[in-house]
Image: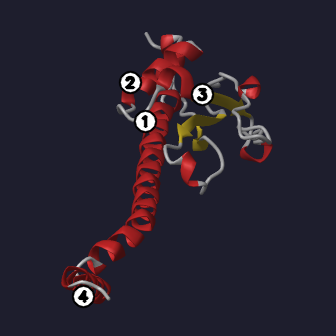
Amino acid sequence: MPTAKQTIRTGAARLVGRRFLGSQGGGAAVDFALVLLPFLVVLMAIIESAVFLLAGQVLQTSATNAARLILTGQAQNAGDTAAQFKNTVCATLTVMFNCASNLYVDVESFSSFSNISLPSPTNSNGTVNSGSFGSTPGNPGDIVVVRLIYQWPILATGLGFWGKNANTLVATVAFRNEPYGSAT
């Protein structure tokens, strides 16, 4: 036969067990823990996509501004080399970009718009194909295509959405050079 002490312990254990199973005080914490990880993953994807789109717009604006130097003949009259032109482009980019290693500049000139044929800026594995890039700003009246190619690093690669470490941003401007004269 159980003693009075054992009966009190057993009764107390049953009472605590019922209270624990019937308690709903931690339900909100459990719900929050279940929803937190998917919420953070979606939030990270939204933020990274927004920054990627902003970077694309900044790169396009920089390409347009740099192309204006060729369009008006300023780059040609100054005798800018490919490296000098790239430095001019980098000066207009914000702190979002690493010009030294991730930015590629391709300037090609053509006799007419129908003759424009540009190779893909990337290989089949997603790396930049910089071997086909040129630096020919053309003469007055020539058709010129300026492309800025940037390997944008993906921060959330571990989430499994993209399956790669970088996306390629390409900003392109096509125009006909103005009939500029030489600098005097």
Mark 1 near mark 3, Cβ–Cβ under 8 Å? no
Name the quadrant of the N terminus. Answer: bottom left
Pointer 3 residue: 104
Name the foreground residue: 61 vs 41: 41
Looking at numbered disc 3 in the image, what kind of residue is underneath it?
Tyr
Question: What residue does disc 4 label?
Answer: 11
Give the camera-side residue of 108 and 132.
132
| Residue 78 coordinates in the image, percent (x, y) | 48, 12
Mark 2 lies on residue = 91
Q: Do the residues labelled 4 and 2 touch (CB within 8 Å)?
A: no
Q: What residue type is labelled 1?
A: Asn
Question: Is tag 1's residue or tag 3's residue first in the polypeptide sequence?
Answer: 1
Q: Which residue is drawn at 47% across and 49% down?
A: 52
Mark 3, other Cα within 10 Å: few <14 / some 14–19 / many ≥20: some
**In x, y percent, where is residue 55?**
44, 44
Q: Is residue 151 above or below residue 38?
A: above
Q: Which numbered disc covers residue 65?
A: 1
61 relative to 8 in the view: left or right:
right
Q: Which of marks 2 and 1 is nearer the N terminus?
A: 1
In terms of image quadrants, where is residue 134?
top right
Q: What residue type is labelled 2?
A: Ala
Is 1 in front, or is 57? 1
Look at the numbered discs 2 and 1 and tell me whether their residues touch, using CB distance below 8 Å. no
Q: Do the residues labelled 3 and 2 touch (CB within 8 Å)?
A: no
Whether label 1 touches label 4, CB < 8 Å: no
* Of callouts 4 and 2, the N-terminal one: 4
Secondary-structure class at tag 4: helix
Please state which of the two labelled residues, at mark 4 or mark 2, is closer to the viewer: 4
For mark 2, give the secondary structure: helix
The residue sitting at the front extreme is 1
